[in-house]
Image: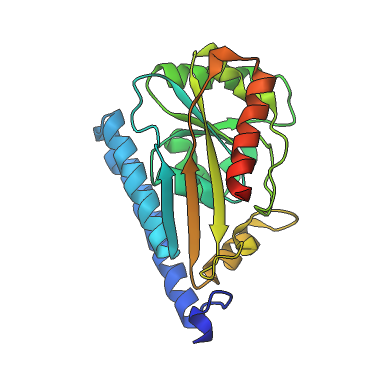
Amino acid sequence: MAAMSGRGTSTLATRGVRLTRIALHLLRGALIVAAVFPFLDAQGRRNAVERWSHALLRILVVHLHVYGEPPIRPAQPVMLVANHVSWLDIFAINAVVSVRFVAKSEIRRWPVIGWLSARTGTLFIERAQRRDTTRINQLVAEAMLAGDVAAVFPEGTTTDGSRVLRFHSSLLQPASLAAAGVQPVALRFERGDGSLCVEAAYDGDKSLWDSFGAIVAQPEIHAHVWFLPVLPAGATHRRELADTAQAAIADRLTS
């Protein structure tokens, strides 16, 4: 059937069901954050975020494939650095391990998702203000020292997933401040036939709604998440560290 082929699209009825389920799931997330989070400890909140993210992927028919060793409650501070393809990246990672993301301030204004992101610990950076990087770096370092896993997208923008842009080394400064390891994470989204799913990308001039519609229209998406070996932050300059992490991700995605 065309609706289930690797390059097909889901039927209108299927999309309608998914949209309804997503709306209900977002409402459920808001209720959990507002009514349940105040009574949970840090570990309980992390577990709730992981379960909610995994459920969202199931609703979107995003099949999650995880490789390597994720930093499940690390004994030492660790920062994840990943290539950036889509807003799906956040939920693909959070479904494995709940992390404190650094995100552009515009996301805070997204309907429902922005509010949920803020209430679940996302740190928002004003990219137009260079001095805001110093503030965010300090907050990220403090979060890691307090036991959270931090995550950044050092490309500073999204791509269609076919390439990795040069990493901005300034975003890796918290690793030095917290003496944290840096773990590269490679992300790739595929169609059912194994080809690159460019529809999953939130790039170019796409609006959030355009991106959302393109993802819901897919019969299925396969999200591949590789947790690569940890790089010791103190062993090299942050520029070299950024280049090493970028190369590790690029090698994984092209191998």
Residue 25 location (% of width, % of height): 38, 58
Residue drawn at x 31%, y 29% as measured from the top left: 42
Judge whether residue 26 can be spotted in this image. yes
Residue 87 location (% of width, % of height): 56, 50
In the rendered view, tell whether residue 171 sits above or below residue 52: above
Q: Is 238 placed left or right of 76 in the picture?
A: right
Q: Is 83 placed left or right of 46 in the picture?
A: right
Q: Quadrant of residue 56?
A: bottom left
Residue drawn at x 69%, y 53% as measured from the top left: 203
Residue 239 location (% of width, % of height): 69, 21
In the rendered view, tell whether residue 189 sits above or below residue 109: below
The residue lying toward the viewer, choosing from 120 and 38, is 120
- Farthest-out residue, left: 39
Residue drawn at x 49%, y 55% as measured from the top left: 223
In the rendered view, tell whether residue 42 sits above or below residue 116: above
Q: Quadrant of residue 99?
A: top left
Judge whether residue 83 can be spotted in this image. no
Residue 48 location (% of width, % of height): 31, 43
The residue lying toward the viewer, choosing from 26 and 42, is 42
Say how the picture is coloured. rainbow
The residue lying toward the viewer, choosing from 123 and 171, is 171
Q: Quadrant of residue 17?
A: bottom left
